[in-house]
Image (tube, rainbow, N blue to C red):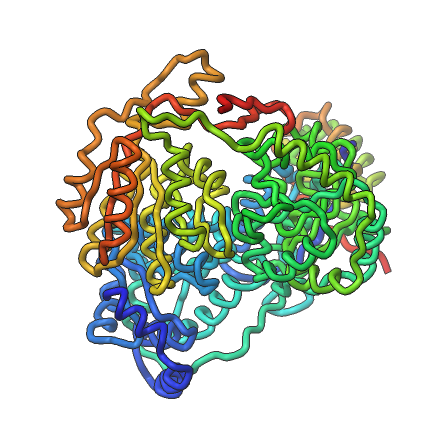
Amino acid sequence: MSVQQAAQAQAQPQRSKAELIEKWSKPEVITGSEMLLRSLVLEGVDTVFGYPGGAVLYIYDAMYGFSDFHHLLTRHEQGAVHAADGYARSTGKVGVVIATSGPGATNTVTGIATAYMDSSPLVVITGNVVQQAIGTDAFQEADIVGITMPITKHSYLVRKAEDLPRVIREAFHIANTGRKGPVLIDIPKDVSAQKGLFQPVKEVKLRGYNPKVMPNRLQIEKLLDAIAKAERPVILAGGGVIYSGAHEELYQFVTKTGIPITTTLLGLGGFPSGHELHMGMPGMHGTYAANKALQNADLIINFGARFDDRVTMRLDGFAPHARVAHADIDPAEIGKNVPTDIPIVGDAKLVLQALLPEVRSNPKVADWRRQIQKWQQEHPLTYKDSDLELKPQWVISMIYETTKGDAIITSDVGQHQMWAAQFYKFNKPRSWISSGGLGTMGFGLPSAIGAQIGNPDRLVVSINGDGGIQMCAQELAVCAIHNIPVKVAIINNQVLGMVRQWQEIIYDERYSHIDLAGSPDFVKLAEAYGVKGFRATNKEEARRAWEAALAHPGPAVVDFVVPKLENVYPMVTQGRTIDEMILGDEE
Amino acid sequence: MNRRCTLAILVNDQPGVLQRVAGLFGRRGFNISSITVGASEEPGLSRMVIETEGDNRTLEQIQKQLNKLIDVIKVVEVSAQPMVSRELGLIKVTAEPSVRPEIFGLVDTFRAAVVDVSPNTLIIQVVGTSDKVDAMIELLKPYGIRELTRTGVTAMVRG
């Protein structure tokens, strides 16, 4: 499938979806495989990311000539799951994966864990050996339901074909409501072959699953009161704001109250990064102002962030003066890490809507804003630029300037990820796709493919390190064959940069096994796949290569060769509180 | 400060549900002192009774995390209310004919029962709170306990 085809699929009018539902809703005796495909169509699925194999042959046979959704063949099951994840995070729709049993299923594990940690809605369908063979150590058998139990929101082992319509309806409902997350459906081969009566299921009946979305009025009033009294309030916004589509309400809330805001790694884009009240990201590589603000706040208002350890750093010294209000769709996150004074269980959008009409902030917040501005001026995000070398931060800034903050940026994990989070100013939600919780190398490229499939009209840029790109580089084949025009930037410092930084700062420069010598020539690698490749070693080349990549209608790889020794600052080392920052090189 | 806590968890009677619940305790570092599972008053649902231990924050997390499992219908902290809790123990003791009258005396006092007699052993069944089962075991130790098995606690709120 090309992006143009994907665009057409996306652009299909509502009527056509209704036609599809009409076409596939009739009760009929069909195979489990056909039930699966029809049920996916009825869920509105337009693209499935997958990889065939023995245990899913009936499913793939049913897909032969089936044109009511697209199937994208990745080159590794991990790539399929990350692509589905990028699709899900960038569109808000459920990402769908099909993989075979055994190794196919176990290859999805990293992708599923990535989605689970970042609350991304996926439905992962795996084949399994025939039911009679389950438990016998049969060829390509793995207990994938057992293996993924700790990293899925829920899972199913389907015992008969007639259960499939209900299971699929439930799986989509569970994946994309409440705190979103991946759901696994394991289908033994005999079930996908078996015939049965297909009866579409509309209603979901799950007694054990009723996410609470509407906030408690009493807690809302407590928070309104706390805000009216607070002199040094700070808003901490996380991925929950983006997943609930609460960015507009958040914008109104911030501008109405004048309360400064910091957004977590997953919250980037939930509020415009360039706004004067936005302090950037908090935490280990957060800004000076954001960390100082949290540490000195008298009220922290958390919307949909989970007080991750990379945000709080040393917990017993975190925000010692602050009352904490925490609004989260997942009650288990409230009070899990940070003792909470005002717990609010609910959807971020509904919480903000409940607060907006009545919220009034304290006039003293003006003094607090001045203090924060002072911190921002004292230690802005900065780096020592050079005209001799190509600095990675400069490259990110250039990518930002040339795309005006409107691109979808996906990242891998490591230094380039932190620089992208610091120096790319996001205007819009669902524009920053990055593995935050699990920190999965190899995520950057395949997630960009999924994001591009889901957003054919947007520019998608994938920022990677030279380490991470090699963990899923095989997916360049998918870009090439379907002309998926993602622009892949490799911030190439020839080393595992973040590990090197830790070894330098914490392990007395004992550099252990971080040298990536022997990496391929990335331009040639791109060209070997039929993807346009460019290289840049200085600013002039970087500008020219990047412009050429953007102008090229298809996929392109730009290898930005940057110095080895650059570090990400500010940095808070483990065991320290967030205001104990190493500030590094200042200009 | 750590305290003991008895939870009654109503779950879907589905394959793998015990693994989901036990796995949750394991991976989040929660403690299980005892666990019992059996049918509930409603067909298709089972009730697990888990005895655990932790500080208030941990115990709150345990309940919240359990509630996130789709197959968990309801979690009740039975020990937060007046409750009846019972455990059954089977104790095989060495019992030559000469000491048997003495052992029978203990069994009577505990309203326990001798459920098996062999030439030189007895099996004693004791039912009661865990403390009572503990006490019975303690008193039988001097005779030589050959084998011991306990069911774990099951419990219910009074009234």
Which residue appears at 65% of the width and 31% of the height? A375
Q: Residue at x 48, y 42 (%)?
A: A436
Image location of residue A85, percent across then percent down: 41, 55
Residue A274 x, y percent position in the rendering: 55, 47
Q: Determine whether, in the image, residue A535 is placed left or right of residue A421.
A: left
Quadrant, the N terminus of chain A: bottom left
**Image coords of residue A147 (percent x, y):** 42, 47
Q: Quadrant of residue A379?
A: top right
Residue A356: percent from left, percent from top: 73, 62
Q: Is residue A156 left or right of residue A323?
A: left
The residue nearer to you, when weighing A438 against A465, is: A465
Q: Residue at x 47, y 73 (%)?
A: A166
Residue A399 or residue A491, whichever sits in front: A399
Q: Say how many tags the image has.
A: 0
Query: Is B62 or A129 nearer to us in this picture?
Result: B62
* Front-lying residue, A491 or B118: A491
User: Is residue A518 visible in the rendered structure shown here?
Assistant: yes
Residue at image coords 36%, 75%: A11
- The answer to whether one can see residue B112 in this image is no
Q: Is residue A230 above or below residue A331?
A: above
